[in-house]
Image (tube, coloured by chain):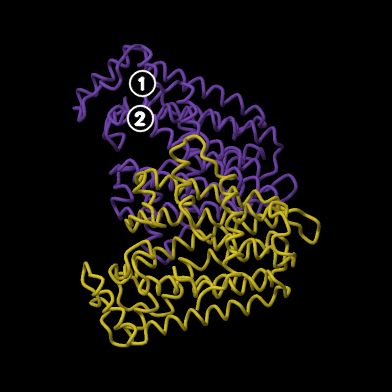
Chain colours: A yellow, B purple
Amino acid sequence: MTPSPRVESAIADRRSIVNDAIREQLPIQKPERLYSASRYLLDAGGKRLRPTIVLLIAEAVSDVEPLSTDFRTFPTPNGEAIDVLSAAVSIEVIQSFTLIHDDIMDDDDLRRGVPAVHREYDTETAILAGDTLYSKAFEYMLDTGAPADRSVRALNELATTCTEICEGQALDVSFEDRTDVSTEEYLEMIEFKTAVLYAAAAAIPATLLGCDQETVDSLHGYGLDIGRAFQIQDDLLDLTVSSDELGKQRGSDLIEGKRTAITLHARNQGIDVEELVPDSPSDAEIEAAVERLEAAGSIDFAREMAHDLVESGKERLEVLPQGEPRAMLEEIADYLVERGY
Amino acid sequence: MTPSPRVESAIADRRSIVNDAIREQLPIQKPERLYSASRYLLDAGGKRLRPTIVLLIAEAVSDVEPLSTDFRTFPTPNGEAIDVLSAAVSIEVIQSFTLIHDDIMDDDDLRRGVPAVHREYDTETAILAGDTLYSKAFEYMLDTGAPADRSVRALNELATTCTEICEGQALDVSFEDRTDVSTEEYLEMIEFKTAVLYAAAAAIPATLLGCDQETVDSLHGYGLDIGRAFQIQDDLLDLTVSSDELGKQRGSDLIEGKRTAITLHARNQGIDVEELVPDSPSDAEIEAAVERLEAAGSIDFAREMAHDLVESGKERLEVLPQGEPRAMLEEIADYLVERGY
């Protein structure tokens, strides 16, 4: 399966709006080295899936013609004008901060095909750039012009999301030393590490625009489902796509001993996943390991799990009015597990 | 001069309340390694000056008998009950996060007489512990029960404060490579790096309790003044107190080439501050360098600058009702430049 041209173009259109907004809201100002390091990874690319979801949810809950409305002054039923674009930038900036700090923690050299921030600059600057993006994200979320009670709810969601991302990252690291991680524990870990930011991206625009709690909760669930599917697809791509296409070493999860839906299934099939690849495996040794996982049904198991999550997520969109924005949110869910990188 | 027993005991009383609140609001929960690393530096000590200011400002603007009122349900003139203790914890937790990340950036081994978090745990865990405290601080500030419009203003102050702390840290590092830093640039750097968190500690309780903008602004100015005085005193202590008492190497600023009020003055007196101490100086070589700075009048210059800032800060307290809480805030200002460590 390949993603439909329609969803690719829906993402591309919103990506360009988000990129302009990032340049506008996060200019490279004094101290210049700090802000250029803060912008470096954002400028290096990225699909902008999470901010695209923010903008699509705003369009969907308002049932407006896609891209017909200025995201800086997005209208609510009460006639307020909300800057949902600032919320979208906030979510993307949080994502960027977590990647910068994760790359330091994992000592990864490459990200989006360019040197990681701590390689291009230095570790001190990379820590500080991440910290700067962290508070900037809160500033942007406070800058939507929404009524104070809704801003407080959005900020609360953002803060607890960030705490959970840290907890998820800590769980992921702690799992590397354990051979008895259950599927439930794995699902909780990827919920925290990855899915909660998708949930925030889906729920926060609804909160800011004044939707009822049932709608907000259902969209939150959509984000959790598709965010987990996204992470499982990431785990699959790590095994099935070449190092060139990935922009990093193929099979790095196997090498680092990360727990994934694939290796958890394989262990239950009696495979010693610790011994699947040697320390510095060749391409052929990675390929052989993947073939064993394939034969054990572990790849299909993960694919099915991701597929089921996407279907569950799409069902949660039933709280939205029928229309093109909702259809695109459904296609985005499919896109997350159909994308090749 | 030594601090009065009255102010020492006012700080000690509030420190104990803040310490209980930290244990209550930041329990060591799952993932345990993450939360024990997050608590490690907070548990190692600290005077809790900033949260003490939060609590004293609440008492001062309300003109209540000191320690007669529960800080969890602090009354406003409108009869609301505000959890100013949660705001106090938020400010202390921000301080702790910045220390943890600063120690990684400076590769310092010791803090408060114990190993730095990245030494006691590891760099990955220390980065993540700092990031966790960061979002927790926002959660705590959202948890005061204040009306939403005031919460939004408090959150805004907290977010911009964090951004400025990062900018100040970046400026501090960039000054190490420059020999032409002006006193104005230095004062801006310490305002961002250190003073803005004192300003937030003083202004935010007034905001949460519904004070008028003039009061909030004046208290903000009090915090900026005494926060700068605190940093200048820190620079003085680095030169004048033994390594044992400091809990770190005496003269480390001279060794690392940090710009301080003392070395900026010395440079203007024609002293080559880059050559004041060799790379790994003995105690005697540090002592000789300090004597040269003393003779050049640089130590007295910095003392006077700190003293003037304290006097200016105290004048800004005139927006507060006369009474014991205000008197203690004045004494805290004096305390910041009279403390020996």
Position of residue A171 in the picture relative to residue A146 (left or right): left
Disc nearer the start of the sequence (2/1): 2
Q: Amino acid at mark 1?
A: Thr
- Residue A189, x across and y down, in percent: 43, 70
- Residue B59, x across and y down, in percent: 62, 40
Q: Which residue is mark 2?
A: B176
Which quadrant does the C terminus of chain B fall into?
top left
Chain identity of mark 2: B
* Gap in angstroms between the C-alphas marked 2 and 1: 12 Å
Residue at point 21% right, 29% down? B279
Q: Mark 2 vs mark 1: tell me if same chain.
A: yes
- The tally of labels here is 2
Q: Nearer the viewer, residue B67 or A277?
A: A277
Residue at point 45% right, 56% down? A98
- How busy is the neighbourhood of tag 2: few (under 14 within 10 Å), some, or many (20 plus)? few
- Residue B46, x across and y down, in percent: 41, 43
Residue B340 quadrant: top left
Q: Which residue is mark 1?
A: B263
**Which element is circle 1 on?**
helix
Q: Amino acid at mark 2?
A: Glu
Chain identity of mark 1: B
Q: Nearer the viewer, residue A243 or B27?
A: A243
